[in-house]
Image (spheres, rainbow, N blue to C red):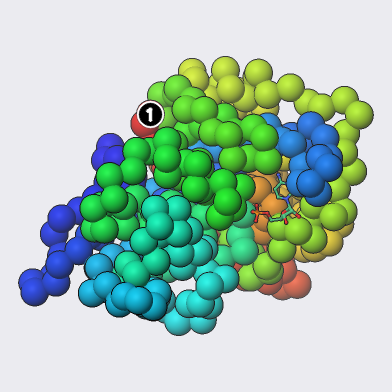
């Protein structure tokens, strides 16, 4: 399959720049190793990219010395912030500061398909895509490693999206080591209409005295064994997220009861996913989930996705 962070030179006629696809991620494993003096938590996580994408169309704007260049971000559909708190904007600002070129400007058109506040890393992926694309159109010549160093200052998950398609992440999440695997795993994503803020979930977390080891999940992922993977997925953030939003916990329980290999919440939620044997199995589980929704359960977006082959 294609490199999920590939740069596509083809743009509508008359436009110059790059278009980059920014994939969503799932955490197949997330364990907390301890709380750090800086307020963050040390963790271990197996993160994999799946074929649900935002796209970024990037174009250099004429430099505007002596003042800072414009970072003109727009978003379709509208609704997200397009200012300095958007991670793609943050990435552009951090990149030009890092190279001492504040006069650089860019137009960023973001097409949003990954639900926000959903544990799918959409904002972080947009930021990574912005780093890659702006490095190219601004002709900065930074290496992947230099971009990774900037990524950590934007958010804990951004480095993963420079280490696609699968990584074992440690530190506060920003130390991403490529993970081998056969890829092509099938998942059902269930995105409830409930946002869960990462900081709020971590606040409710109880750091485990005996962390669960990730060996089983890594072995299952490497072998591409959906059955073993489904039995070994784990996320320490489920308990605090379900305490905050019991409806998300009920959705995870219901999804897990429909015959997938396993079911889990991704990241700090609110998306939950089912691990499936193949596409037919995933379509079956997705159909069963839609068909059996209780009247008091809010309607979720249900998507069938696939991981990439490392
Ligand atoms: O790095 P990011 O901006 O994604 O983190 C959002 C919030 O989640 C942090 O401010 C922190 O409260 C919490 N967090 C944490 N430990 C991590 C990652 C995030 O406590 N490893």
**Residue 5 placement, left or right of 242:** left
Q: State the residue position of label 1.
A: 310
Q: Position of residue 163 (x, y in %)?
A: 44, 36
Residue 107 seen in render? no
Q: Between residues 63 and 16, which one lies in front from this camera angle?
A: 63
**Residue 268 placement, left or right of 306:** right
Residue 93 seen in render? yes
Q: Position of residue 143 (x, y in %)?
A: 34, 38
**Residue at horizontal 61%, vertical 60%?**
118
Quadrant in which the N terminus appears: top left
Total marks placed: 1
Q: Quadrant of residue 2?
A: top left
In the image, residue 201 above or below residue 229: below
Q: Position of residue 115 (x, y in %)?
A: 53, 65
Q: Between residues 97 and 28, which one lies in front from this camera angle?
A: 97
**Residue at horizontal 36%, vertical 31%?**
309
Q: Between residues 155 and 219, which one lies in front from this camera angle?
A: 155
Is ligand 1 closer than 8 angstroms to the Cβ of mark 1? no
**Residue at horizontal 28%, vertical 45%?**
141
In the image, residue 51 above or below residue 55: above
Quadrant in which the C terminus appears: top left
In the image, residue 15 above or below residue 202: below
Q: Position of residue 218 (x, y in %)?
A: 58, 22
């Amino acid at each position: 399959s294609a490199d999920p962070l590939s740069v596509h030179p083809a743009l509508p006629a008359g436009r110059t720049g790059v278009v980059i696809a920014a994939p969503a991620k799932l955490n197949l494993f997330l364990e907390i190793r301890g709380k750090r003096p800086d307020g963050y938590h040390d963790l271990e996580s197996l993160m994999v990219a799946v074929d649900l994408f935002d796209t970024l169309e990037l174009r250099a704007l004429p430099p505007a010395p002596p003042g800072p260049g414009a970072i003109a971000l727009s978003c379709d559909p509208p609704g997200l912030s397009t200012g300095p708190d958007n991670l793609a904007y943050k990435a552009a600002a951090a990149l030009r500061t890092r190279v001492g070129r504040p006069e650089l400007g860019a137009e960023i058109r973001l097409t949003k398909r990954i639900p926000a506040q959903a544990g799918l890393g959409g904002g972080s992926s947009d930021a990574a895509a912005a780093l890659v694309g702006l490095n190219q159109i601004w002709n900065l010549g930074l290496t992947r490693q230099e971009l990774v160093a900037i990524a950590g200052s934007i958010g804990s998950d951004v480095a993963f999206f420079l280490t696609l398609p699968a990584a074992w992440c440690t530190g506060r999440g920003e130390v991403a080591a490529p993970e081998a695997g056969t890829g092509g795993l099938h998942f059902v994503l269930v995105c409830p209409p409930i946002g869960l803020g990462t900081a709020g979930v971590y606040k409710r977390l109880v750091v485990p005295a005996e962390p669960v080891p990730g060996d089983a999940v890594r072995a299952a992922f490497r072998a591409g064994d959906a059955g073993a993977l489904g039995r070994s997925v784990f996320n320490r953030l489920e308990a605090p997220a379900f305490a905050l939003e019991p409806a998300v916990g009920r959705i995870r329980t219901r999804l897990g009861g429909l015959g997938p290999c396993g079911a889990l919440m991704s990241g700090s939620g609110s998306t939950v996913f089912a691990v499936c044997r193949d596409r037919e199995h995933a379509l079956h589980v997705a159909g069963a989930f839609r068909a059996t929704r209780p009247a008091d359960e809010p309607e979720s977006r249900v998507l069938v996705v696939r991981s990439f082959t490392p």
